[in-house]
Image (tube, grey):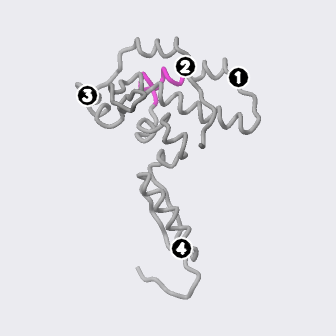
Amino acid sequence: MYVKERFVLQDRHQDYLRSLVAPFGYNGFGELVFYRTYSRAIRDAEDNIIGQEDWADVVIRVTNGTFSIRKDWYVKNHIHWDEVFWQDYARRFAIAMYLMQWLPPGRGMWAMGTDFVYERGAMCLYNCAYTNITDNIGDDTNWSMDSLMNGVGVGFGPLRNDSLEMYT
């Protein structure tokens, strides 16, 4: 488990977000793209699908995920965590995201705050990556394949330790 400490936005802040009207644009096209691409299924304890996230649910999930990673880092590094301060900060963070004054990358909207990130790390949040293929080809391809299996686009360049000349 990569992220053990969890942050949860207070209920009153969640209720406020749910009371707002989502500012999707483009005559409904923005909302269509959101539901098709970033909204996740809501599941019950038996893993049955019982609904689909709306915009407020995604904002809350992303906020909780982002601040859980921060809180976990603070705790692991013995830094004081001021819950009152971070609740206020997270509230402002969430409202600005809800109003689309800022947005995380698409992978952040889709995966942040999920058990996948908490249990396996942040690789699924990467858009792209780059590596050099060196004489240690096993480790280099292992890392590349792990990234590719998490949906990350991987570019690479060869770094050879021999006299072979490559012509382009």
Q: Is residue 157 magenta?
A: no
- CA distance for labels 1 and 4: 45 Å
Looking at the rendered image, the quarter that the N terminus falls into is: top right
Q: Is residue 94 magenta?
A: yes
- CA distance for labels 3 and 1: 40 Å
Circle 2 — which element?
Answer: helix
Residue type at the position of mark 3: Tyr
- CA distance for labels 3 and 2: 27 Å
* Residue plotted at (44% across, 49% down): 127
Q: Of 30 and 53, which appears nearest the observer?
A: 53
Q: Which residue is mark 3?
A: 26
Mark 4 surroundings within 10 Å by alpha-carbon count, few (fewer than 14), some (14 through 19), many (20 or more): few
Residue type at the position of mark 1: Asp
Of the residues under marks 2 and 1, which one precedes in the sequence?
Answer: 1
Q: Which residue is mark 2?
A: 91
Of the residues under marks 3 and 2, which one precedes in the sequence?
Answer: 3
- CA distance for labels 2 and 1: 14 Å
Q: Which residues are magenta?
A: 92-102
* Residue plotted at (67% across, 21% down): 83
Circle 1 — which element?
Answer: loop
Residue type at the position of mark 2: Arg
Please state if 113 lies on the left or on the right of 30 as rendered: right
* Residue plotted at (40% across, 30% down): 46
Q: Which residue is mark 4?
A: 137
